[in-house]
Image (tube, rainbow, N blue to C red):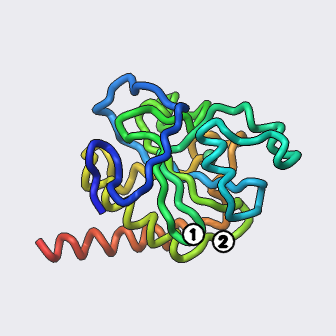
Amino acid sequence: MNILDHRIDIAPFRHSPNCDARPDAADISLLVIHCISLPPAQFGGAYIEQLFCNCLDPNAHPYFQEIAQLRVSAHLLIRRGGELLQFVRFDQRAWHAGVSQYRGRERCNDFSIGIELEGSVDQPYCEPQYQRLIEVTRLLLKYYPGLNRERIVGHSDIAPGRKDDPGEGFDWRKYRAELAVDSVAEIGRG
Ligand SMILES: [Zn+2]
């Protein structure tokens, strides 16, 4: 797995129009973890990709009438089985965080990469998703010098009271512990 031209080479790229230029293309310094499932708490299907690409059929499910007009996308989606999709190049500003603030700085979309896990705030995530997320996180941390293990948050951390994802089902201890092990191993390999 590698990054070429701000895209992960193994991830199918589904172009989302829901992005624009970053104010500072060189400032990529926050990783935001989200979750999404469409319809809510149902997994599988192509509805998430359709939402991010503005082609979700509002009549396919009653809930979709509320959201089909949204203009949103994360950079990446990790599905339940660990499959990775990319929608927006990392040097572009994807519209994933909305009104948000990190350490006093607003508009987190300006300087963050958004990763959606297919999931629901009250359900555990799948092991292949953790493994893929850890792999992707390591790659992004290596590639973008503004990122580090301290600058990884949930959507709920930067939009408290408004957003609750990725939720209690996301095991931050496991994620951070495995990231730490990986980086120690990397130092050991020299
Ligand atoms: Zn979110």
Residue sitting at x 53%, y 60%: 78
- Cβ at disc 1 under 8 Å from ligand 1: no
| Along the line of sight, the residue nearer the viewer: 186 or 53 | 53
Residue at the farthest top position: 23
Apparent side of residue 1 relative to residue 117 in the rendered image (left or right): left
| Label 1 environment density (alpha carbons within 10 Å; few <14, some 14–19, many ≥20) | few
Q: Quadrant of residue 23?
A: top left
Marker disc for residue 85: none
**Picture coordinates of residue 77, whole percent (x, y):** 53, 54
Q: Quadrant of the N terminus?
A: bottom left
Q: Secondary structure at mark 2?
A: loop
Q: Which residue in the protein does label 2 denote?
A: 124
| Along the line of sight, the residue nearer the viewer: 157 or 69 | 69
Residue sitting at x 25%, y 73%: 184
The CA span between labels 2 and 1 is: 8 Å
User: Which is nearer the N-term, disc 2 or disc 1?
Assistant: 2
Residue at the farthest left position: 190
Q: Quadrant of residue 169?
A: bottom right
**Picture coordinates of residue 73, whole percent (x, y):** 56, 40
Q: Secondary structure at mark 1?
A: loop
Amino acid type, residue under disc 1 in the picture: Asp
Residue sitting at x 47%, y 60%: 84
Q: Are marks 2 and 1 in contact (CB under 8 Å)?
A: yes
| Label 2 environment density (alpha carbons within 10 Å; few <14, some 14–19, many ≥20) | some
Q: Judge whether 65 appears above or below 40 on screen.
A: above
Q: Which residue in the protein does label 1 denote?
A: 171
Amino acid type, residue under disc 2 in the picture: Pro
| Along the line of sight, the residue nearer the viewer: 78 or 187 | 78
